[in-house]
Structure formats: C-alpha cells, structure tokens
Image (spheres, helix red, strand yellow):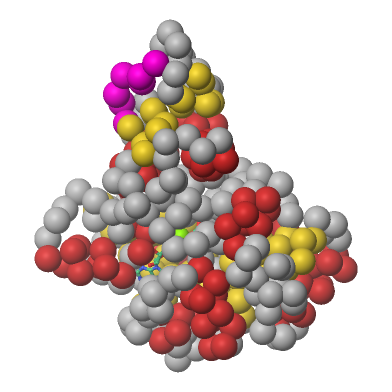
Amino acid sequence: MGQFLSNCSVDALAIAAQALRDGSLVAFPTETVYGLGADATNPTAAARVYEVKGRPSDHPLIVHIGDLKYLEQWISDIPEFAIALARKFWPGPMTLILNRSELAKDFITGGQDTVGIRIPDNSLALGLLEAFHKLGGAGIAAPSANRFGQVSPTTAEAVQDELGDYLSDTDLVLDGGQSSVGVESTIIDCTGELPRILRPGAITIEMIEDVTGLKASNSLDKKSADFEQDNIRVSGSLENHYAPKAKVFLDQQPVYGSRFNALGSIDTPNGVIRLAAPTSVEEFARALYSALREGDHQNLDSIYIAQPTGEGLAIAIRDRLSRSAKGR
Ligand code: TXA
Ligand code: MG
C-alpha cells in the first residue's frame, strides 16, 4: 500500500522526487490522467512499473520532462514540425514519438528505436519534475496509473483503488485533485515526413495541421499492415482497453432501470437513472472515466452512453468508448 500525500508542499515534492531517485514509484496527477512514475533511467524501477500495472514489458512508456531543455538528451533528431508542435502545445496533453538517443533504453521504448516524450500541464506534475531534474533526474517514465487494460484514473482515490494493493510502503501517491482534461494525451508519431496521430486526445488533428501547416494522418482511419503492426505496440489502441466491469452500450435506447450517461442537452428516458449530464464535450471527457468507475462501485452490469458527436475532443471520447464497449 503506497503512502498517500495530499499535502503537496514544495517539501512534499522534494521528498517525492528523492523517492523516485531512490527507485520508488510515485503516482502523480497530470492534466490528462494520473501517471505511475518511475525514474526513466532506472531499469529496476521501470520493471516495477510493469509489475504493478500487470503490463507486458514490450509496451513502451512515455517519458515526462519538466522543460524543453531536457528534450534533447532523449532524442537523436527532431523534424521542424515536431519543434513547432512542442513549442505550441507543451506543457500540454500531447506526446511526441521521436527517434531515441542512447539514454532511452529498451526498458522504456519496448525495444523500439523511438521514444515518447511529454511535458504535462499540471502544476504538481511540473513541480515534481522540477524537483526531480534538480536532483539530476533526466525524466519520469509514467504510464497511466491503472492496471493493464482498465480505465485510467483521474483522481488520487482512483489510483489508490487501482494500485493500492500492488504498491509498496516506500511508493507514493500525490493527490492533486481531479485531472482537468480526463482523457489521455494525443500521441503523434513524428518519425515520418508528416505528423501521424496514433491516439486521439485533446490536441486535435485540426490543431496539429494549423500549427505545422502539414497534412496530418490518423492511424485510426487506416488499416494497413503498417498500422496493424503499430497497434500491437501502442497498448492504448488495443481493442479491449478502457473497459469497466459493467457492459457498456453505446447509442442504444437504455432499458428500464438502467444507468445512462449523456450530454445534458439529451433528456433522460423514463425509468432510467442518470449517471452524469455533462454540459459540454470538455466536461464529458473530464467526467468520463469517473462515471465508468462509479458504475463499477455501484456494481452495475450495464451502462448506457450517448456519445458526443462531431470533431475535436469528441473523437477521443468516441475512441475510448468504442474500446470500453468491447468489454474485457
Ligand atoms: O496522457 C497520457 O499520455 C498519460 C499521462 C500519465 O501522461 N500517459 C499514458 O501512458 O497514457 P500509457 O502508457 O498508459 O499510454 C501511453 C501509450 C501506450 O499505449 C504506449 O504503447 C504508447 O503510448 N507509446 C509510448 N511510447 C511509444 C513509442 N515509442 N512508440 C509508439 N507508442 C508509444
Ligand atoms: Mg494507459
């Protein structure tokens, strides 16, 4: 059982940074979801991340850094368009896949020649990263702080629920309240001529094309052998991810007595119990995973969800929900 740190003063962040340097795990908030952090240069700590998550070891981890100046050491080269994206959207809900340097070892990249990097936009995460860099740390490897295949946590309590039984006494959970975005970062492969979205998120294809002036592709649109290959590596793209215990029904008429989640503009059908009524797509994303978790707490066997339509963040929501609906 990890220790719960809700008093995240500068001292607490220094303690957490030191714990990371000593090889312990620290779960911390980001604007997307909570991450389970380990020193990205420590193979033993990284191995514990896989163990605690129950995740296969060939799935790569995202390296989180506190500032652009720490990027160079992790990568061997970077295209102009990726520099433009980094300048515009970091800190923020975006992960760039770049060719790795010697520093990014196989235990981080899953044996691939690329590494995923992100600067999160959350004051606690940035405080932790700053304290960690001060101690000579190069980056914090952090997958979402859930057991493999399950719903990502967006609160510290949800992390404790997911991983409490697997963390040890020297591990820490930092409590920074609810994640403001609620779905995982947009992952953009920057190793080709053009940006390619591997996982949709709050940084949308329109935003990417605007900033780079390039045509971006979306791996979800295509099913070439190439993309199939990637899908094995991008664990978030496995079909049975993000699945709660309840069966998720999308865009179907809820049966009498069942639970229902939809935008506030959609009425609750007679005899149906409303789980959530977010008033915007942003709020829908923010509350999505906690609504799914709440369903599990209530031991529901089904949840009916009316998906938000349209582009932008709604694409990321539908991506996660379609996987949730595939079940476990
Ligand atoms: O928002 C987020 O990205 C959160 C927070 C904690 O930063 N992290 C997160 O990590 O979602 P994780 O491990 O749950 O999902 C990251 C995804 C995985 O599916 C992994 O396979 C993929 O990123 N990934 C990481 N490095 C990669 C690489 N070099 N090439 C392709 N995919 C990569
Ligand atoms: Mg994950």
Estimate the x, y position of residue 243 in percent, counting from the top left.
40, 48
Query: What main secondary structure does the magenta stretch of the protein show?
Result: loop
- Please tell me which residue lies in front, 11 or 174: 174
Q: Quadrant of residue 28?
A: bottom right
* Residue shown at the point (62%, 54%) measured from the top left: 161
- Please tell me which residue lies in front, 311 or 230: 230
Residue 126 part of the magenta-drawn span: no
Estimate the x, y position of residue 271 in percent, counting from the top left.
45, 11
Q: Quadrant of the N terminus?
A: bottom right
**Extreme residue in the bottom direction:** 102
Height in image: 279 above or below 154? above
User: Is there any visible trace of residue 55 in the rendered image?
Assistant: yes
Q: How many marks?
A: 0
Estimate the x, y position of residue 139 in percent, counting from the top left.
59, 77
Q: Relative to 58, is 137 on the left or the right?
A: right
**Extreme residue in the left direction:** 224
Q: Which residues are magenta?
A: 250-256
Q: Relative to 52, is 245 on the left or the right?
A: left
* Residue shown at the point (73%, 55%) measured from the top left: 175
* Residue shown at the point (28%, 54%) measured from the top left: 239
- Please tell me which residue lies in front, 177 or 95: 177
* Residue shown at the point (65%, 74%) measured from the top left: 25
Height in image: 153 above or below 55? above
**Extreme residue in the top direction:** 270
Estimate the x, y position of residue 270 in percent, counting from the top left.
43, 8
User: Is there any visible trace of residue 81 in the rendered image?
Assistant: no
- Please tell me which residue lies in front, 117 or 181: 181
Q: Relative to 190, is 12 on the left or the right?
A: right
